[in-house]
Image (cartoon, rainbow, N blue to C red):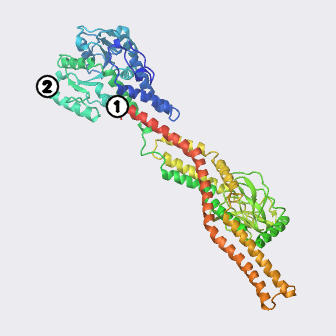
Amino acid sequence: MVQPRSPVGGEGGGGYRWVADGGRRAVAGGLRGRLDALRELIALSRSRLDGRALEGAGRVLETADERYRLSGEHTVVAIAGATGSGKSSLFNALAGANRSQVGPRRPTTAEPVACVWPGSRAGAEGLLYRLGVPAHRRHAPADGSSELHGLILIDLPDHDSSATEHRAQVDRMLELVDAVIWVVDPEKYADAVLHERYLRPLAGYAEVMFVVLNQVDRLPGDAADQVVDDLRRLLDEDGLALGEHGEPGAAVLALSAATGKGVGELREVLGQFVTERGAADRRLAADVDAAAERLRSVYVAQSRVGLTEQARAEFDDRLAEAVGAVATGRAAERDWLRYAERACGSPWTRMRGWRGSRWRTRSSGAGAGAMGTGAFGGGPTGAGRMDDGRAGARQVRRGRTGAGRGDGGGTATGQSCAGRGDVGRGTGRAEVSRTGVGRGGAGRAALWRNGTRLGSVGRQEGPGHLLPGGGAAGEGGEPAVDGRAAARPVVEQAVRTVAGEAAHGLPAPWAQAVREAADRGAYGLPEALDKVAAEAEESLRGGPAVKPRWWTVAASLQGMLSVLQVVGVLWLLGAVTGAVTGAGGAADWVSGLLPALIGSVGGPALTWMCRVVARGPARRYGQDAERRLRSAAAGCGRARVLEPVAAELLRYREVREQYAVASGS
């Protein structure tokens, strides 16, 4: 009778359909789409939500599958009520014969009784088997009226029966039938058990519900109208919509099963209800509504969710702080100025620096690097290098020690998370920078970060001699500051902050999923930032890749001025010793003093001018180095943290869209 559900995306768009000869029109696209959305919702949420939260929605889908595999020709309507309400009498009145036992003994109905009005096609047996109605309790109506063709009427046990198994049977069958007729009497229509246990929780099923006030023949005068009005009031307080003035909702009727008053009206309403063949769809739609309402707290966000541009920018700024992008830019700027000063300085200055460097190299053990601890772990020690005649040990960056520059022959060790320090030329203080190009004298090395002194990293007793432990002692014997204390907390705080921003307003399970995604991405992020910083450091080691042409011009002018200075000095020496013969007198002295003076004053003046001119290019060079390191750190953070978080947010949005379809909103 029923064709199975076609796959989603297949012919017909998927969903549930009755076969052409089943007497059932194709299920409305709305309900079909909601059921498919609920199924997709469960599939997307299994790894994020507790199975118990999805259990109710899964039962709804199972119920829908079962119902649509059975006859669409028939409508299952149950008659439920309290002990003595007269539901069995009403059942018999509708069936036209005594099909259900009626008597003073309570409880009277121990098993469900069915009355089946045959339709144009068979198929009721499967529904009765699903409901668990025994074969000997299945009956046919006495008159076989055509207006109720396709109706399966079920007389249930008392919902307030003293027998526990009766109440359990009622609860089970109420979840399976298409519609319910609640029978109340004038004495117990306001019973708290009925309203609190059934009517109020089932308020969403008003469109497949009838409320019948029975035994009105026992009420004098207009008392029946008053009781009906009070019953309507109670139903309204229960949140049960009433079908008045053509609006969908529960139908409220007053009748007497004993006298037959009002039974015809109920029969007429039932006939129209059965003819529409829409009870199963309405019931399932109400099931989906109830399941969606139970899931609302785990799918509906309290506010707009997502990462704002401001949150992303703050995350990038924190990572840039962790790798010392600002300090790197400033150190690169100073390096550019030093390269410019060396390129544009006089030959005497370069020669003096070269000779001093050779002397310091010998006294400090050829500038060998010292073992240290990086910001995120220990690592190998690199060899020292010669730079501008100054030998020293480069700071340790994130687990590596390399080569740098030191004044006074000192070996400086530092932590990788350190920022820039003051230029300690000749003061015994070591500058530790993000680029790894530090300058320090024979003394103690201090840990600096973005211009703020964090603590002492190591101390030297003499040139090239570290304290035991590779410079692990600070000023006054205090222990060295581990780089983890300066950089790792910054990274962890950045991840926590961006995860908190992304999870803000999300339902608890999805907020937890976002935080877990951020935590997984943060694992290994410090090491990745370490690599980024090391690559940036390596790219800056050789100075600017393209040397400005004016450096060559300035160097040529410095050479010419030096030649003038040498010629002038030699001329003066010749004049003093008498080796120079010429005009004699003052002319000889002027001929020597003038070039010597031009060479001596012009060289420093040219150096000063070059230093002033170099400030702008050096600043741009430092800003470019900072921008590159900042961009690399931000890219690392995006790949490891922001993209997994964005994937979780995207998954939530997909689930939220499916929930919106399933809930009918």
Precedes in sequence: disc 1 or disc 2: 1
Is residue 464 shown above or below 348?
Answer: above
Q: Is residue 364 left or right of residue 339?
A: right
Residue 241 in view (yes/no): yes
Q: Is residue 523 left or right of residue 216?
A: right
Is residue 419 shown above or below 575?
Answer: above
Picture disc at residue 493: none
Residue type at mark 1: give it. Answer: Pro
Q: Secondary structure at mark 1?
A: loop
Q: Position of residue 366 (x, y in %)?
A: 83, 61
- In the image, which is nearer the foreground, mark 1 or mark 2? 1
Is residue 40 shown above or below 112?
Answer: below
Q: CA distance from mark 1 to mark 2?
A: 33 Å
Q: Position of residue 352 (x, y in %)?
A: 79, 71
Say which residue appears at 72% left-offset and 52% top-offset: 399
Picture disc at residue 220: 2
Q: Secondary structure at mark 2?
A: loop
Q: How many marks?
A: 2
Q: Position of residue 395 (x, y in %)?
A: 72, 59
Q: Position of residue 656 (x, y in %)?
A: 43, 37
Question: Foreground residue, 295 or 191?
Answer: 295
Q: Is residue 649 left or right of residue 524?
A: left
Q: Is residue 507 left or right of residue 488?
A: left
Say which quarter of the image contains residue 443: bottom right
Is residue 653 shown above or below 14?
Answer: below
Residue type at mark 2: give it. Answer: Pro
Residue assigned mark 1: 201
Residue 337 in view (yes/no): no
Question: Dot 2, crowdedness within 10 Å: few (<14), some or many (≥20)?
Answer: few
